[in-house]
Amino acid sequence: MSKPYLIKNRHADDISNTSSNPAFSQVLQAKLSRRSLLQGSAAAGAAAVLPLGLLQSSGAQAKTAASSARARRLGFKSVPFSTQDTVVVPEGYTARAFYKWGDPVGIAGKMPAFKPDASNSTQEQAYQAGMHHDGMAFFPLPLGSNRADHGLLAMNHEYIDNGLLFPDGTANWDLNKARKGQNAMGVSVVEVRRSGNGWEIVRPSAYARRITVNTPMSISGPARGHALMKTAADSRGTTVLGTMQNCANGKTPWGTYLTCEENWSDIFTKPSGNMTALEKRYGIGREEKEYLWSGVDNRFDSDKNPNEANRFGWVVEIDPFNPQSTPRKHTALGRIKHEGAEVTITPGGRVAVYMGDDQRFEYIYKFVSKNTYRPDNGNRTHNMSLLEEGTLYVARFNADGSGDWLPLVYGQNGLTAENGFADQGEVLVKTRMAADLLGATKMDRPEWISADPFASGSLYCTLTNNNERGKEGKPGADAANPRNDNRFGHIIRWQEKGGDGTQTAFTWDILVLAGNKQAAKAEHKGNIKGDDFGSPDGLSFDHRGVLWIQTDVSSSTINQKEYAGMGNNQMVATIVGSGEYRRFLTAPRGAEVTGIAFTPDNKTLFINIQHPGEPSEGLSDPHNPKAVSSWPDGPSGGRPRAATVVITKNDGGVIGS
C-alpha cells in the first residue's frame, strides 16, 4: 500500500472543518490564564475545578437513580497496566465473553453456528452477531419493569475488517462479499437472562433481531421528503435502506434504543474527484481502501447516487421490544458523525439529547424537543414522537467559563437562502456547515456524553485527543494547559443554567487532563490523581453516580511512543469531585474497550471488547489472523472476535463497591 492506514480511525487524521471559528484550545487558554486553573500541577485534584453547585443533587429535577444515595468511595483494588491477551478485572470479580461476533442472535429456525475459518455465508451473517461491538444498552423485561435478571441487550456493530471476515480477505471481490460486510454492520438485539449458571443468551427468542445496512428505515423530521434526501430508488425521500458505522448510543425513558451513525462517510466515494462543498465538509473521498463497497454497489458511489450519502449521519431510533417495527432516522437531531446521544428529561418535562461530532475540531450539539415527555407507559406512542420535532443547538464555549447554545434554526443567525440554506431541512442535512456559520467552538474529537444522575443539567464529554493542536496553522495551547500536542485528550463538563436543559446558557470547566506521568514532555503528563489513562472515549455514570471511563488508544499507538508502558486499553472509574481515578479493567491485545450497560441493581456490568487483534495499520492478514490476538477463543480458535463481556462480583455485590 502507498500509505499506512487504520480501518476504524482513518478519519482521525483528517480535518474537514476549515472555518475560522475559535478552537477550544484558544478558549481554554484565555480561561485558564485568567483563573490560573490547575496551575499546571498533577496534584491539583478534580474537585478544585468543580463548577459551583455541580455536586448538589437537584432532587426531582435529577434523572432518577436506582440507588438512593450517591457512591462515596470505590471499593475495588486497582488492576495494573497489562499487555496480556485477556480481559483483566479486579480481585473478587469475574469477566466472561458471552456474545461474540458470529454467534447466532437467536432468531427461531435461523441460528447458524460460527465457522472459525470465517466461511459463514452472506445469508448466515445476517442472523449472527456483527463485527466490532460498540455502544450498548440493557432493557429490563418486561417493558416498564426494573428487573435485573432478564432483559434485552441492544448493541452496535460499528465496522468490519475484511481480513477477518473472509478466509481470503479481499481476494475475488464481488457484490456477494460486499453484502456479507453489510450484514456484519448495524445492530443486534438479543434476549439475556441470569440463571443459576450465570448470564446466557436466550435462544430462540421472539425479540432477537439483526438490523443491517439493508434494513428498511423511515425518515422523520424536517428533512423527510427533502430534495436532498431523494434518490432514484426513493423518489419521495422518505425511506432509506440501513444504518452503518454505528458507534455509541442512547437509551430513552420510553424504552427505545438510539443508534448513532458515525464514520459513514468512509464508505462513500466520489471517483471523479469533483466533490461538492457539502461532500468535502463531511469528508467523502475519491477512493477507499477498507470496505470496497462502492466499486460493486452503486449506492455508495456518489458520482452515480449523489444524495445517498445525505441519508446517513443520523440518530436512529429502534424499538427493541418489537422486532417487526421499522427503525426511524430522526433528522431533527442533525447530520454529523454522531458518537452518541445522551437522553435527559428537563425539569419541565421536555427531552434534551446531547451529542458529539467525533472528528478533530468538530462541535458539541444538543436537541430539545418541542413536546413534553409523559412518564406513564400508556403514553409510549406519544413519547416515540418526541424526537421528530424540536430545536437543534450547537455549543459555544466562552473564555470566562460561560457558554451558549446557538440555535440551528432556518431564518435565524444567517441561516438563510443567501448563505446556502433554503429551509430547515437543508440546515439539518448541512448541520456542520450551519454550525460553522454560527461560530460554534471547535473541540478535540467530542465523543461520549453522560449526564450525572444526581445533578440535573450536569453533563460530561470525553474529548479523545487531537495531536494537530499546535502544528503550523493550527491553534496552540498555553503554559497553564500544556497541551499543544494533545495525544491524551481530556474530559469537559458543563452545567446547564438552573439545571434545565431547555436553557441556552451554561457554565463549563475541565474535569481532568488525561496523560502519562512518565511522559517525557510536559504536555503529555496530564493532571490525573491515581491511575493514568489516555484517549478517553466511552463514558457513563452508573446508577450510584460512579463515572466510568473507557479508552480508545489507536492500535498504532498502544503501549508505544508517548503511551509506552501503559499497556492495553482500559476502563477506569472515578467519584466526581474526589480527583481519584482507579483502573478497573484492561483489554486484550489490539482491542478497544467500549459499551457500558448496567443492570438496574448495578450488580451486572456489560461491556464490549472491540477489534481484538487489530494490527497497527491496514487490514488483518487473512492468512495469519491471530498475529496480534487470539481472544476470546484462545489458540484453538480460528481468529479474534469482538465480544460482549459480562462482569459480576463473586459475592453477588454491587459493581465498584
Image (spheres, helix red, strand yellow):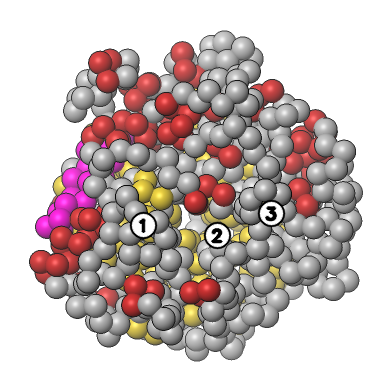
Q: Secondary structure at mark 1?
A: loop
N-term-proximal mark, 1 vs 2: 1
Q: What is the three-letter code of the residue carrying label 3?
A: Gly
**Residue 136 belongs to the span the image colors magenta:** no
Q: Taking the image as drawn, is residue 69 in sight?
A: no
The residue beneath circle 3 is 618
Q: Earlier in the sequence, mark 2 or mark 3?
A: 2
Work out whether mark 3 precedes mark 1 in sequence or the reverse, and give the earlier one. 1
Q: Name the foreground residue: 382 vs 547.
A: 547
Q: Position of residue 344 (x, y in %)?
A: 34, 49
Front-most of residues 320 and 218: 218
Residue at the image point whose x is 22% and y is 55% from the top: 26
Q: Residue at x 36, y 69 (%)?
A: 545
Which residue does the numbered mark 1 point to in the structure image?
Answer: 471
The residue under the point 49% across, 51% down is 13
Q: Nearer the viewer, mark 3 or mark 1?
A: 1
How crowded pointer 2 is (Cα within 10 Å; few <14, some 14-19, many 20+) is rated as many
The range drawn in magenta is 390-406
Occupied quadrant, residue 423: top left
Answer whether labels 3 and 1 touch (C-beta < 8 Å).
no
Tell me if 196 is positioned left or right of 71 in this view: right
399 falls in the magenta region: yes
Label 2 to label 3, Cα distance in Å? 24 Å
When the figure is inspected, residue 431 is found, relative to residue 78, above or below; the finding is above
The answer to whether residue 250 is above or below residue 382 is: below
Residue type at mark 2? Gly
> Real-space Cα distance between discs 1 and 2?
33 Å
Which of the pair 28/273 is nearer the observer? 273
User: Which mark, residue 595?
Assistant: 2
Q: Viewed as shown, does residue 216 lie left or right of 49?
A: right
Give the image location of residue 656, x and y in percent: 47, 79
Query: Helix, strand, or loop for circle 3?
Result: loop
